[in-house]
Image (tube, rainbow, N blue to C red):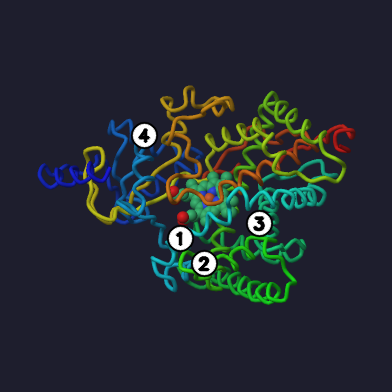
Amino acid sequence: TPLLLHIYNHRSSVSDPKLPPGKMGFPVLGESLEFLSTGRKGHPEKFIYDRIAKYSSLVFKTSLLGQPTTVICGAAGNKFLFSNENKLVIAWWPDSVNKIFPSSTQTSSKEESKKMRKLLPNFFKPEALQRYIGMMDVIAQRHFEASWEGKHEVSVFPLAKMYTFWVACKVFLSIEDPKHVAKLADPFNVLASGIISIPIDLPGTPFNRAIKASNWIRKELISIIKRRKVDLAENRASRTQDILSHMLLTSDEDGQFMKETDIADKILGLLIGGHDTASAAITFIVKYLAELPHIYNEVLKEQMEIAKSKQPGEFLNWDDIQKMKYSWNVACEVLRLAPPLQGSFREAMNDFVFSGFSIPKGWKLYWSANSTHRNPQCFPDPEKFDPSRFEGVGPAPYTFVPFGGGPRMCPGKEYARLEILVFMHNVVKRFKWEKLLPNEKIIVDPMPIPAKELPIRLIPQSSSYVMI
Ligand code: HEM
C-alpha cells in the first residue's frame, strides 16, 4: 500500500492530524511504573485494556522506558506494524539490551545486521530442524532421568530452563556434557536477569554483572568457534552436526561468510531469545495440564499412540511430530493465554499517519499480543481454555501473534515448537501431576511465571506405560 501511505502522508501535511489520545505521565518515568506494575500483579493486559476503554481508541500514546510511545492494538494494528518493517518502522530495543550486546550495534553496521537477520531463518528451516528432533529427544530423556524420575515433588520453571538450555547447547554447539552445560548456564542466568534490570553500570549492580557475564560467554563462544573451524578443516566435525557448523559454512548472497564475532553474537542472541521464552511456555503447559484433566487425558492419548508405535530405544522423528496435532493446539492455546513475550517495540523511521493519528518520527511504537489474544472479537469467550480454536483454518490473520509477524517474526518459532512437543511427549509419558499451590500467583516481569516457580507433586504413570 505505498500509494495509500503516500496519500496519507500528503493529507497529513494538509489537515495536520492530531497525536493519538493518551497521557505521557511523569517526566522520564512516564507511565513505565504502571506498565510494569500491572505485569507484576499478573495482569499486563490491564494496562492496555484500561486505556482502550478510557480513550475509546485502539491507538493511544504513553511514555515507556523514557520514550514517547504509541501503543497500537488489534489485528489491523499488528498487520500495519508487521508489514511495514524497514518501510515505516524499524526494530527498537531499550538501551539496557544494547549495552549488554554491544557488538551487534557497534562492530557491525545496520546493513550487516540486516543481512545477518536474513541468514538466520536458514538455520531454522523445517528441513534443517528435522535432523535435530532425535537430538532433542535424547536430551529430554537424559533430563527426565536426571531431574524428574524418582522425585515426588519438583519445581517446574527451573527444570524447564535446564531442559531448554541443555537442548540449545546440544543443537547449537554439540555440547551435551552436563558439567560443561552447567558452566555456561551460570553466567547465562546472570545475563538474563541483567537484561531486565535497571541499566546502571556500577560495580555490583545486576546490570554490570550482566555485561561482565555477556563478555565471558562471548569469549567462551569464540574459543568454541575457533576449535570448530579447525575440526571442520580436519574432518573431525560434521558439516551438519549443529547450528554452529551451519553458520560457519553458510555464505550470504555475496559469497561472504560470517565473522567469528558475528557468529558468537548470533548464538548468544539465540540462546537468550530461546531461553526464558520457551521455558515459560513449557511451565504454563504443565500448569494448565494440571488444572484441566480432560485436556491432559487427550494429550496423553495422542502421545501414547505415538509412543506405542516406536521400537524400544527409537527416538522421536519428524513423522511423530506431525502426529502431535492436538498437543500443539494445546500449546498454542497456552501461548494465547500466557504469551511469553508480551509484545515488542518499533521506532517510526519518518512521520506518518496511522488510523487518523499522526506518529512523529523517532517515536516508539509498541504492539501487544494481549491486545488481540484476550479480545472477545478475536477469540470469543477469551478466558476459556479451548484448544479447538486452532482446529481447521484457526484464528483470523494477525490475531494470534505470540511469535510476532512479518520480517522480524521470531526466527526460533519452529525450533520452539519442536522442543515444546518433545517435552510434552516425554512428560506425559512418565507422569501425571498436581499443583502443590492451588492458587499460586502469576508474575509478569517481563515473562509470565508462577510466583513460586510452579511446585508440583509427581504421580508416575503405571510402569507398563513407561516401559513403552
Ligand atoms: C515459545 C517460545 C518463543 C516465543 C513465544 C518467542 C517470541 C518472540 C517474539 C514475539 C519475538 C519478537 C518479534 C518482534 O519483535 O516482532 C521474538 C524474537 C526473537 N526470537 Fe523468539 N520466541 C520464542 C522462542 C525462541 C527460540 C527458541 C529462539 C532461538 C532458537 C528465539 C529467537 C529469537 C530471536 C533471535 C529473536 C530476535 C529476532 C530479531 O530481532 O529480528 N525465540 N521471539
Residue carrying label 3: 168
Q: Residues within 10 Å of mark 1 (few under 14, many from 20)?
A: few
Marks 1 and 4, Cα distance to the nearest angstrom?
26 Å
Marks 3 and 1, Cα distance to the nearest angstrom?
28 Å
Which label sits in the foreground, 2 or 4?
A: 4
Residue carrying label 4: 50
Residue at x 60% of width, y 72% of height: 216
Q: Earlier in the sequence, mark 1 or mark 4?
A: 4
Q: Secondary structure at mark 4?
A: helix
Marks 2 and 4, Cα distance to the nearest angstrom?
34 Å
Q: Is label 1 in contact with label 4 (beta carbons under 8 Å)?
A: no
Q: Secondary structure at mark 2?
A: loop
Marks 2 and 1, Cα distance to the nearest angstrom?
9 Å
Residue carrying label 1: 198
Residue carrying label 2: 205
Q: Is label 3 in contact with label 4 (beta carbons under 8 Å)?
A: no
> In which image quadrant can residue 20 be found?
top left
Give left or right: position of 24 versus 168. left
Is residue 435 placed above or below 409 in the rendered structure? above
Q: Residues within 10 Å of mark 3 (few under 14, many from 20)?
A: many
Counting from the top left corner in percent of width and height, residue 34 is at 39, 45
